[in-house]
Each structure stands twice: as structure tokens, then as C-alpha cells.
Image: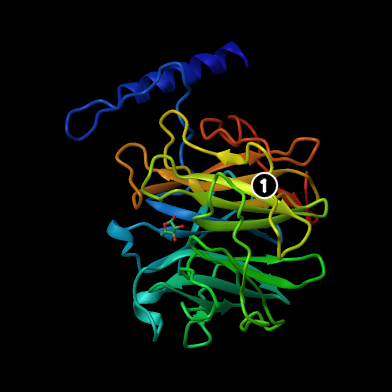
Amino acid sequence: MPNSELRCRGLTSLLLLLLLLPGGGVLAANPELPAPPPPILDGYRADPDIRVFGDTYYIYPTSDKPNWQTTDFSCWSSKDLIHWKNEGIILDVAHKLSWANIKAWAPTAAMCNGKYYFYFVANDRIGVATSDHPGGPFIDVLGHPLIDTKTAPFPTYPIDPDVFIDDDGRAYLYYGNTHLAVVKMNPDMLSLDGKPVEITPKDSAEPFREGIFVIKRKGIYYFMWSVDDAGSDNYRVAYGTSKSPFGPIEIPPNNVILQKHGLAKGTGHHGVVQVPGTDRWYMAYHRHSIPNGSGYIREVCLARMEFNPDGTIKPVDPLVPAFQPGNQGEPISGGRGR
Ligand code: FUB
């Protein structure tokens, strides 16, 4: 690391060390550690679902409000993973749904046959809305939830959807809290092909809580999830792998890939995006806001996610920025990253 960068990191650490709290206190920081990188989105936001559609990256987050009483979903776009533009409100559950009006949480987006599908939580159920544009607005097409507490033949809390589209075009919807559910989607992306089945990872010392996110790399399915309570400093991300989108999920040693470090606490509920045509991957995640964060005062950050030669995921350090100053980020042209 060049000396100038070390000096710069030292200065930022000192500034954070001296950060004043409203009550007059001073944040306790370890001066040996670098300051956490700044968040990438404005405002209090969480549960970032990160996607790439065409030459543009998108993040679909939760908009944080006290006690998780949130009503609106926004969308953010970027051409390089560095500069993010707020596309505005894409679905206002307080006014646009007939079956729910609050607790707008943890959405996910997918593209199929040129149409965009937005799966979201409202009043503890999962709905689906569609749009011709990734930046919305999205319309609730069913007029009722896609998934409620009775959809799965086992107990799970129907929150935190994630849609994974396999190489053959088949889409799978994952969701749940404490118990992980998967169900194949019909080609219309608006109905389920059968009943959800339970694939909760059983042998993990890092128990599945919520925030499932699935990717596929070199023929292996990676299942990543959040552990502990979103209000805990120890909220973190663990993972397992499988040869099938239906599991069973095998647990590698040291399967925690994101956890608190220094002033970055409550790091979890992430999403992952692959730069098209490359083996470069980035993780968007939230942490408790710095300063004065909590389980519903959160901010969205970005980090590089890398793999070891044996396919295991390297732990992500929330104190390391995704890009160093001067880096051009990850623009896409001709359908590929650089
Ligand atoms: O943002 C509301 C809830 O907090 C999400 O559904 C959970 O995953 C947790 O992040």
C-alpha cells in the first residue's frame, strides 16, 4: 500500500475516532483499524438486492423507517458500481396495494422475456409486481399475495424473497425466516410450479435466519444467508454450496463470509452481482448506520467478493472499499465488463 494511502487511511480513522455523538460522547474506535468505507446509497436503506440488466447495475433496497414500518420501495441505478442514481419510488405499498399497506421489506428483481418482475414483502407476505422497465414503476398484477404463511407445508415466515434464474431459464423463488423454502416458478413468473420445499441448511454452526441469496459459479450453486437478529452487532453472512438449486446445502469449513469489523457492525442481508463476462463479483450489504445505527437505521455498502482456487468464498472485510480512489469501477460495454 503506498504511503500516501496509508496517511489518508490514518487521517480518516482519526476523524472517525473523534466523531461526536449527539449526547456529547465520542465513538469508541480502534485507531489501528481503517475507517469503514462510506455507504454507496443516500439515506437509511437496507437489504440491498443487486442485479445487472443490460449495461446497468441496479439496487433494490428496503427504505428504513423506525420499527421497520416502511411503505415505499426505491430503485438505484449505476453504470459502474461507483456512481448511483436514485430512480425514485417504484412501488408505494401504502397506496398501490389492495392487500397490504405497510412493512415494505427486502425486495428482489428479475428479468424474464424482456419484462421485469419485482418480488417484495408487505404485511408479512410476498407479492409480485411487474414493469417494462427495471426502474419501474411496478404494478401489483395479482391483486393478492403470491406467498403467505399457508403456502409452504412447513412453518416459515414469508419474507426475504430471492429469485434465481438458472442457465436453462428456469426460475426458482427462495424465501423464509428460520426455515428456508424453495419453489420453482412457472414461466409466467407470476405463479408457482408446485409447493415450496424446505432446504434449510441443517449442519451449519451458523444457522439460517433470513436474507437468502443464491448464485451459480462453475456449475456450483452458492446459498448465502444472514445469521442472528438484524438488530444485533453480530448480524452476519454465512454460506453453503450444492450441486442442485434444490439443495441439499453442504457446509464448508469457515463459512462466515461477512461479519462485523471495527466500526462496521450489523453487517448482513446482502446481494451479489457478477460483472457480465468476467469472474469478478461484488457484494452489496447493509450495516448499522455510522454513527447511531440500529436494526432499522442502516446503510448500504459495496465490497468485492472473491473465490479461492478450490471454489470456497474468501471472507469479505467490511473495512475494505470495493474500489480505491481513481478506480473506474466496472462499466459494461458490448454486454461484458472490461
Ligand atoms: O428490513 C426488514 C427486515 O430486516 C428484513 O426482512 C430482514 O432480512 C432484516 O434485514
In this rendering, does residue 270 appear at all? no
Q: Nearer the viewer, residue 118 or 81?
A: 118
Determine whether 284 is above or below 28 in the image: below
Residue 205 image-quadrant placement: top right
Going 24% across and 32% down the picture, which residue do you hit? 21
Quadrant where the C terminus sits is top right
Going 56% across and 14% down the picture, which residue do you hit? 4
Residue placed farthest to the front in the image?
Answer: 203
How far across and down, in percent of the image, does residue 293 sit?
33, 43
Residue at label 1? 251
Going 53% across and 50% down the picture, which residue do you hit? 207
Determine whether 217 is above or below 89 in the image: above
Q: Nearer the viewer, residue 88 or 12?
A: 12
How far across and down, in percent of the image, does residue 103 sit?
36, 68
Quadrant where the N terminus sits is top right
Packing grade of label 1 (10 A; few <14, some 14-19, many >=20) is some
